[in-house]
Image: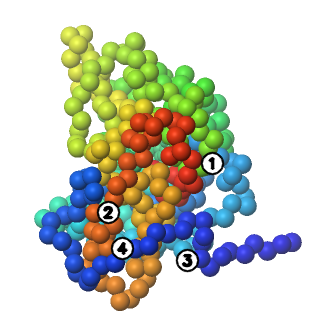
Amino acid sequence: MSERVIPLVDQRHPSLPLPPVVAGQTRHGLPVDALRRPLTDLRISVTDRCNFRCSYCMPKEVFDKDYAYLPHHQLLNFEEITRIAGVFVERGVRKIRLTGGEPLLRKNIEILVEQLAALRTPDGQALDLTLTTNGSLLARKAQSLKDAGLQRVTVSLDGLDDAVFRRMNDVDFPVADVLAGIEAAQAAGLGPIKVNMVVKRGTNEKEILPMARYFRGTGIVLRFIEYMDVGATNGWCMDEVMPSAEVIRTINAEMPLVPLEAAAPGETAERWGYANAQGQHDPSCGEVGVISSVTQAFCGDCNRARLSTEGRLYLCLFASQGYDLRQLLRDPAQTDAQLAATIDAIWRGRTDQYSRLRSLQGPDSALGQGKRVEMSYIGG
Ligand code: SAM
Ligand code: SF4
Ligand code: SF4
């Protein structure tokens, strides 16, 4: 039997050189990037593993039993995550989302939640702390996550029809267990809950209306996400993208919708409210959202940074390289002030706007050809 050798340095994700900084040299004010976008939102991937094999994210053929996931010592530990998160908060971050892979697979995730929930902004405010999950372990964990200080959850669910759902998660996971997880989250007060549905034309567009009917009037916000060309393994093609405009038309034909204002600057979802007989938004019926990452890029407001499971900082979902913050976190000489100066310098140099350029250049542009990191590694 051949033994698999795990390289000491993981060459799958080469890192970018860190900018040189002088100790404690954060400039006055919070950093804005080269396109004047602030840094307010941090997504932290806590594992690159998942118990689902959604074909658009971790296709079975690639993420099989031989796939080399990161070894444990390469992951940031909870103390490292909390320390770097604290520095990000000091530099402007107000919202932290835990993601993955499947974040609820990370052992003792509640301890990390508790540590992050204790962080405060420079003016003493708690963070907006949330988590994105496939919901498979939520029925079991909703209450302990709430007790640990998690405020709300986003659950990914691509359909209500059990056969369609089992096919999409590709591990034969029943939809009833995810619905039970959503109910448990609601009962625990992890709201407002959002449910994300990736729409893949030819696979689950028939689920749009049943999903809209099911969540209408429940207080849960259903959001439809355009299938994205993220990563390099899902065999993405434009034919399988259902534009958000079509999703809205489909729902509107049965349940009339009216456009709503954006909830906050940098909000990725366009909001639509269910209308009453007078054509006005009826708050008791709630709203849906669409995230048009392909057909209507929102790079202009993109205030999000992503920290990978092993501590690489990525400035865009479509990046091929990140900055290795773990080496700084594991260097005893590095102070928090130095870390802050590094984050500032990296953010100030940011020019990323992949989706905008991609929509200007068209789906066949060279921009789409580069080697990109996987969504399961960088976090959605
Ligand atoms: N496992 C968790 C989950 O599924 O919610 C968290 C990680 S997952 C990578 C985060 C989000 O990314 C999910 O809502 C998933 O549907 C979305 N996602 C993954 N691949 C995608 C793709 N190619 N296009 C659009 N959304 C995608
Ligand atoms: Fe797992 Fe989430 Fe990716 Fe599906 S979308 S394979 S649940 S990480
Ligand atoms: Fe932000 Fe990159 Fe997505 Fe544009 S493509 S919205 S810069 S993550």
Q: Amino acid at mark 1?
A: Thr
Q: Residue 319 in the image: x percent, y percent?
A: 47, 55
Residue at 27% over, 58% down: 33
Q: For mark 4, give the secondary structure.
A: loop
349 lies left or right of 324:
left
Residue occupying the far right of the picture: 1
Viewer-nearest of discs 2 and 1: 2
Q: State if disc 1 and disc 3 touch (CB < 8 Å).
A: no
Residues marked 4 and 2 touching at CB (< 8 Å) = yes
Q: Position of residue 16 (x, y in %)?
A: 46, 69
- The first of marks 3 and 1 along the sequence is 3
Q: Pointer 2: residues within 10 angstroms few (<14), some, or many (20+)?
A: some
Mark 4 crowdedness (10 Å alpha carbons): few <14, some 14-19, many ≥20: few
Residue at 26%, 83% in the rendered image: 23
Whether residue 47 appears in this view of the structure is: yes
- Would you name the residue on which mark 4 appears? 19
Q: From the image, state whether disc 3 or disc 4 is nearer to you.
A: 4
**Which color scheme did the rendering employ for the protein?**
rainbow
Q: Is residue 190 visible?
A: no
Specify the label residue 349 is tagged with: 2
**Disc 2 from disc 1: Cα separation:** 29 Å
Q: Position of residue 200 (x, y in %)?
A: 55, 31
Q: Residues within 10 Å of mark 3 (few under 14, many from 20)?
A: few
Residue 68, numbered label? none
The residue that label 1 is drawn on is 233
Residue 348 location, quadrant: bottom left
Task: Measure the alpha-carbon separation of dots 3 and 4.
Answer: 25 Å
Secondary structure at numbered mark 3: helix
Gap between marks 3 and 1 measured at Cα: 26 Å
Is residue 322 shown above or below 275? below
Give residue 194's position: percent from left, percent from top: 37, 40
Q: CA distance from mark 4 to mark 1?
A: 31 Å
